[in-house]
Amino acid sequence: MRMPLLCTVVFCALARAQDPNAIDLKAPEIALWPNGAPGSEGVTAKEEWIPTTDGFHRVRNIHQPSITVFLPAKDKATGVAYVICPGGGHNYLVMDLEGANVALRLNAMGIAAFILKSRLANTKDYHYKVDVESLADAQRAIRMVRFRAHEWGVDTAHVGIMGFSAGGELAAYAETRWDRGKPDSADPVDRQSSRPDFAVLAYPGGNPANLTVTKETPATFIVVNNDDGLAPASAGYYAAIRKAGVPVELHVYNRGGHGFGMTGRTPAFAQLPVSGWPGRFQEWMVDMGFLPR
């Protein structure tokens, strides 16, 4: 199967020598908890890259959550940042289609991108939960970006979260369950707020009934296809956000199925109207005042 050009560029970055199924993006990977994530202390099991059958790369069995840093060229940087949550049914993470490919598109818009490698609820022999360990990882990622904002050229008031499929469910939890930080914490990262300033949910999974939307929920952009079974839930979440008086934009395209990321799975994606959604997202960011005109 042919792959989109952007996807090909990512893969040409060379595979990790120790695992031909992994991708080496030549980007720094930062452990969120250098001494071990809470609830996973002492776990020595190694992450596993699943042999690819479609040209895309998936990782599972994650116990040491991290973020991989993609920064835009300095002359294009806007100070805006997104933590990216790839999907994979909480079984694995699709690290290129819904990770690196997205990060590169955001970089082209002048947006810093941080791909989250989170613990997964369907990890064999472990009992992680989306709204516990996975959420803690997403919150920690947001705090970490704020803590190191000066180093990465990020405005601490312009840190968002973007999730795809199962990662969209995680992003929805992150935008509805957050705190202002723990000012008395011995860990300076935990003193930072975990509230995203804006959120993007691409064909998100989960049940909107599990989420409590308030007037403090961040402005949200949602994209889904009508021929995706998750479309009704996305519409329901849109309605809940709108009812709370929070700015929200919903784009429902006629066709394109599920799991298209920003670049699609094949070149045919470019012929579909949904392929233009990154442009609509960028327009939304400008319209909301998050990106400069």
Image (cartoon, rainbow, N blue to C red):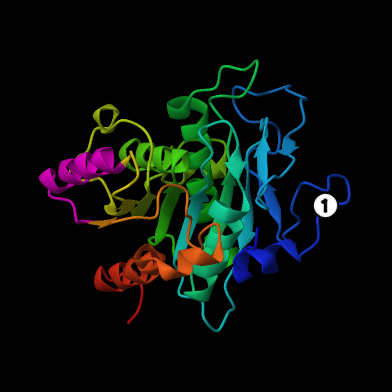
Image coords of residue 220 (percent x, y): 28, 53
Q: Is residue 34 left or right of residue 264?
A: right
| Span colored in magenta | 231-249
Measured along the vertical axis of the image, is residue 106 above or below residue 244? below
Q: Is 196 on the left-hand or right-hand side of 63?
A: left
Where residue 290 appears, as percent x and y from the top left, is 33, 68
Q: Which image quadrant is residue 279 in?
A: bottom left
Location of residue 197 with respect to 153 vertically, above or below: above
Q: Is residue 239 magenta?
A: yes
The one of 238 and 77 positioned closer to us in this rendering: 238
Task: Tell me if mark 1 has few (under 14), some (14-19) or many (20+) residues whose alpha carbon lies within 10 angstroms of its own.
Answer: few
Dominant secondary-structure state across the stretch colored magenta: helix
Measured as percent of width and height from the top left, residue 179 is found at 36, 38
- In which quadrant of the rendered image does the N terminus lie? bottom right
Q: Residue placed at 39% from the left, 38% from the top?
A: 169
Judge whether 266 appears above or below 231 on screen: below
Amino acid type at image mark 1: Arg
In this view, the residue in front, 242 or 135, is 242
Closer-to-camera residue (210/101):
101
Residue at position x 53%, y 25% from top?
A: 121
How many numbered badges does the structure rendering display?
A: 1
The answer to whether any part of residue 183 appears in the image is no
Q: Is residue 148 magenta?
A: no
Residue topped by disc 1: 16
Q: Is residue 171 visible?
A: yes
Looking at the rendered structure, the secondary structure element under dot 1 is loop
* Image point (55%, 44%), residue name: 188
Location of the C terminus by quadrant is bottom left
